[in-house]
Image: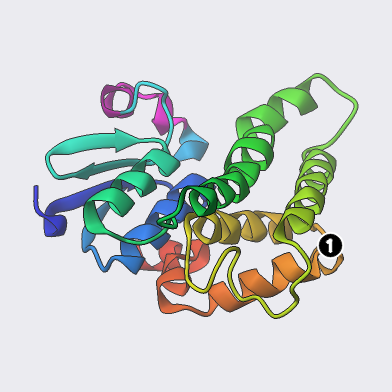
Amino acid sequence: MPDHDAILFDYWRSSASYRVRIGLNLLEIAYQSRAVDLLTGAQRGLENLARNPQGLVPTLAVDDVLITQSLAILEYLDETRAAGWLPADPVGRAKVRALSYAIAMEIHPVCNLRVARHVVSLGGTTIEEWMKHFITEGFSDFEAMLGSNPQRRYCYGNSVSLADICLVPQVYNARRWGVDMDRFPLTGAISSHLENLPAFAAAHPEKWRLQS
């Protein structure tokens, strides 16, 4: 399946989908978008389960294969298109992966909407309180991982990496839930720089919802 026949099954506000849209835009891969409405439970429907047994988004159909899980999709694109999102040296790759995983495997899962809704159903908190608590805690750790160079424009090195692709969607969620990003000046500054790059801007949920 050539790039122009790529299909992304996603949801406009999904952080994981947002990551993949950024990646596809960076590589200038033209693709069709097929919405899977998370609010109506379409992700658990038979059609979506047939391509994504976890009942999640996104799923990317490309190169005659279906790939699920956003980081797996992004690493596949990086490996097959020489995107350069992971450094060539083992130490650099490990550092970029650590930053990426700090968001995608620490902050994101506990702030998944289905997790937050279940916790709220048990009583004792609200979705807003839950989200703010764990995103704030996660970004406190992430800010420390970034180091102390206030001039840096990317999470690692001098170009977009997997960590940057993970960062911007999580900052979007942080703002959505009222997290005080002033507490994380370096994280916020890097995200602000990235958000102005065309590939990131075009993937923004609000713009995407209007275009799709």
Q: Residue at x 63, y 60 (%)?
A: 172
Say if residue 107 shows up in the picture: yes
Return the residue nearer the eye: 22 or 8.
Answer: 22
Count the labels in the image: 1
Q: Give percent across and percent down for residue 46.
A: 30, 21
Q: Give percent across and percent down for residue 122.
A: 81, 19
Return the residue nearer the eye: 131 or 121.
Answer: 131
In the rendered view of the protein, which quadrant contains the C terminus? bottom left
Alpha-carbon neighbours of circle 1 within 10 Å: few (<14), some, or many (≥20)?
few
Is 110 a magenta residue? Answer: no
Say if residue 35 shows up in the picture: no
**Relative to residue 185, is residue 172 drawn left or right?**
left
Q: Is residue 29 above or below residue 62?
A: below
For the stretch drawn in magenta, the main secondary structure is helix
Q: Residue at x 54, y 55 (%)?
A: 163
The residue to which callout 1 is attached is: 180
Amino acid type, residue under disc 1 in the picture: Asp
**Relative to residue 185, is residue 34 drawn left or right?**
left
**Relative to residue 55, is residue 173 drawn left or right?**
right
Return the residue nearer the eye: 44 or 22.
Answer: 22
Q: Residue at x 70, y 80 (%)?
A: 151
Residue range corresponding to the magenta coloring:
41-51
Q: Is residue 61 above or below residue 163?
A: above
